Amino acid sequence: MLKVTPQLIDAISRNANRTASPAVRILIDEILERHGEAAKAVLYYGSCLRSGDDLDGLVDLYLLVDDYRNAYKSRLQASLNVLLPPNVYYLEKKFRGHTVRTKYAVLSMADFKKGTSTGWFHSYLWGRFCQPTALLFARSDEVAQQVFECFAQAVLTFVRRVLPGISPDFTARQLWGRGFTLSYGAELRSENPEKRARLFDAAAMYYEEITGLALEAHSYPIQVHKSDDLPQYSVHITARKRRINQLAWKLRTWQGKLLSILRLLKATATFEGGVDYILWKIKRHSGVTIQVEPRLKQHPLLAMWVLAWRLYRKGGFR
């Protein structure tokens, strides 16, 4: 695990400390009621956070819990969360004549810490939480500090995994742009290259600040070239390390596609209207169309295995 500096945590916490809008607050209150004292923190990330519009689209939230067994009344739901975290749920509430919707994921604090660290191979968590994320609820100041440290670890892990895959001379924009291409490509994601490029533009000053702070924490020999414009960087990384990094990202892409499909299939048992949602998601990301009989949709656990088999037959795992 890389050492997190106070300066990096400070920069991240200043960005992450936010107050939930009234619309999102309604969703958070319902989530906290569902999961009780197990709830430790609620995180807000994704396109709705970037746009500032909570009513247009699906609000992406993460609920961090102390233990999966404490978070559910159902032993099955807890077991699914242990086997392949996170579990994903759908929730909608009425708000001033509108419907506000969320897709929220449930993850334990322990899994959150592991998944944002350098000890975690795939980019599923550190590739998400290196991006600007709002902390909208924390059970205590201690929990909030742990969350900020995990955000910082995610940034450090992201930079460490991306540096060997970019040009020796680079800018913050090039570093993050390449990293988004690699991490988004390691999952079944529909975002096109132009949309990925806009991720940096949505918080350019923030990324510029944390890039400099993150590079200071790394062992790679990095030089900073100051100019009237934004800083530019140079790094020396051996050809061998670059080849290993390239192979690692190929493995992440293969692993990520498989895990994405398994998570989609699992969502048939956790997502309201899960089977229809998964069919739409699979078609959107892989182009594979699968037919499921109406009676099968009433039995999501059975549908999960039928979907897996039909998806395999149609080449969705390739």
Image: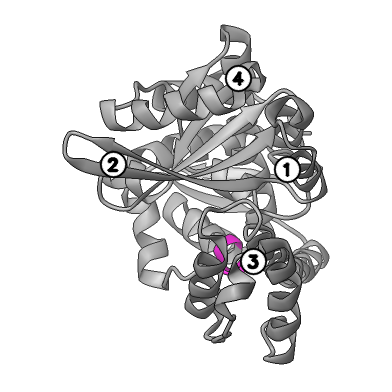
Rendered location of residue 245, percent (x, y)? 75, 63
Q: How many C-alpha atoms fall within 10 Å of the one at disc 4: few (<14), some, or many (≥20)? A: some
- Mark toward the start of the polypeptide (4 vs 3): 4
Element class at badge 2: loop
Where on the picture, by quarter, is residue 129? top right
Q: Which residues are magenta?
A: 183-188
Q: CA distance from mark 1 to mark 2?
A: 28 Å
Q: Which residue is mark 1?
A: 77
Is 8 rendered above or below residue 201? above
Residue 187 counted in the magenta span: yes
Q: Is residue 173 in sight in this rendering? A: yes
Q: Amino acid at mark 3?
A: Ala
Q: Earlier in the sequence, mark 1 or mark 2?
A: 2
Disc 2 target residue: 54
x then y, percent, for residue 29: 43, 23
User: Which amino acid, mark 1?
Assistant: Gln
In the image shown, does 222 or 257 lie closer to the viewer?
A: 257
Residue 186 tag number: 3
Q: Which mark is residue 36?
A: 4
Place residue 112 in its image quadrant.
Answer: top right
* Disc 2 to disc 4, C-alpha distance: 24 Å
Which-is-in-front pick, marks 4 and 3? Answer: 4
Label 4 secondary element:
helix
Q: Position of residue 153 (x, y in %)?
A: 66, 34
Q: Quadrant of the N terminus?
A: top right
Rounded to the nearest angstrom, the CA distance separating label 4 from label 3 is 34 Å
- C-alpha span from label 3 to label 1: 26 Å
Q: CA distance from mark 4 to mark 1?
A: 15 Å
Earlier sequence position, callout 2 versus callout 4:
4
Q: Nearer the viewer, residue 64 or 102?
A: 102
Number of labels in the image equals 4
Q: Nearer the viewer, residue 284 or 186?
A: 284
